Amino acid sequence: YIESDEWLTIEFSRGCIFNCAFCNFPVLGVREDYSRSASDAQEQLQDAFDRWGVTSYIVSDETFNDRVDKITKFANVVEQLSFEPFFVGYIRPDLLVSREQDREELLRMNFLGQFYGIESFNNQSAKAVGKGMNTDRLASGLLDVKKYFQSHKNKLYRGSISLITGLPFETIDTINSTVDWLIENWQGEAFTISPLGIQRDNRTNHLSKISSDYVKYGYTVMSDEEINVKLKNRAGSELQHSSIAPGTNKFSVEEIYWKNDNMNYFDAVDITKQVLEKKYAHNFAPNCHNLAYKFKTKLDAKQRLTLDFAKYN
């Protein structure tokens, strides 16, 4: 029942070499290369094309460009295929900025839908959660990256920036500064934003560094009185996902209503909404993962990238 316009998920390797403070993924800090063999990947890709005509893929790797030799290995695979695939997935932006060979290999592989976990363009905030590159250098480098990919493959590139509201040292002013930069420099590409979640209970037995020791990162739990004041004029379902009682559902995860010196969880939610309103008021595209399911009509990756996407936001 697989159709040629469907996007399948593919995994090239497992684990992430990084250990960002906000991340709840359980396989972090991996140093070994757990990527699959070239012949195995080639067999899967060619078989899916031969049987169903599939050419588009979502890559599930947490950080695809962790090693240049890994990208090279799979770029070589792609060049041996009888068709031209299209890949979207998670790309570590600081590596992409500092290692120009990443760009060449990703282009060769046709890995042109790139999701960048920036989280914050405020330098203090980025450093606090494990993003070491100076954010001014990162922002400038991303513009070079965008220019590079847009100058190849008939501009069939989608860069998607991910941001988190409420990280340490982040303020309303720093977030607004980031949005101004995006409006000035990133229109035509994509960005997403969401409030920080701090978990108190995790059924997978893994918590992020921030969740495990949020006081160390400058957070405390809001008092019942503070929460009630914030909830007074809100719809009960609006924040229901963040106030699940332990044991309500065996699959549920409890999150705290947090606060720090700059904002609290409710502020972060409100700021996020305001940023999204600005996003929809400007010419930002659907993010690279949304290309897989945003459109109801049967379109290939190239057609989806070149549509008048403003009406699909």
Image (cartoon, helix red, strand yellow):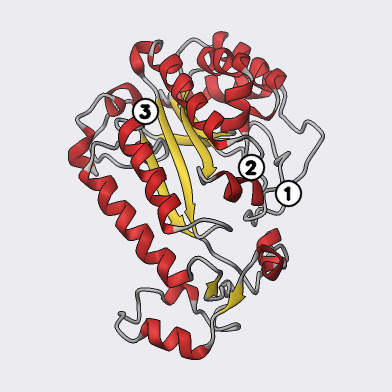
**Residue farthest to the right, as pictured:** 32
Let me know if residue 250 appears in the view.
no
Query: In the current view of this chain or complex, which residue is farthest to the bottom?
Result: 225
Q: Which mark is residue 226?
A: none
Residue on which disc 2 sits: 131
| Residue found at x 39% / y 38% | 1
Disc 3 residue crowd, few under 14, some 14–19, many 20+, Cα 10 Å: some
Task: Locate residue 306, reporting x and y percent.
Answer: 26, 24
Q: Which label lies toward us, 2 or 3?
A: 2
Which mark is in front, 1 or 3? 1
Left or right of 205? Residue 281 is left
Q: Say which of marks 1 and 2 sits in front.
A: 2
* Residue 143 image offset from top left, x and y in percent: 44, 24
Q: Are marks 1 and 2 in contact (CB under 8 Å)?
A: no
Comes first in the chain, label 2 or label 3 = 3
Q: CA distance from mark 1 to mark 2?
A: 18 Å
Classify the position of the C terminus by image quarter: top left
Q: Which residue is mark 3?
A: 4
Q: Which mark is residue 27?
A: 1
List x then y, in percent, for residue 115: 49, 36
Q: Secondary structure at mark 2?
A: loop
Does label 1 or label 2 sit earlier along the sequence? 1
Q: Amino acid at mark 2?
A: Lys
Q: Residue at x 63, y 53 (%)?
A: 23
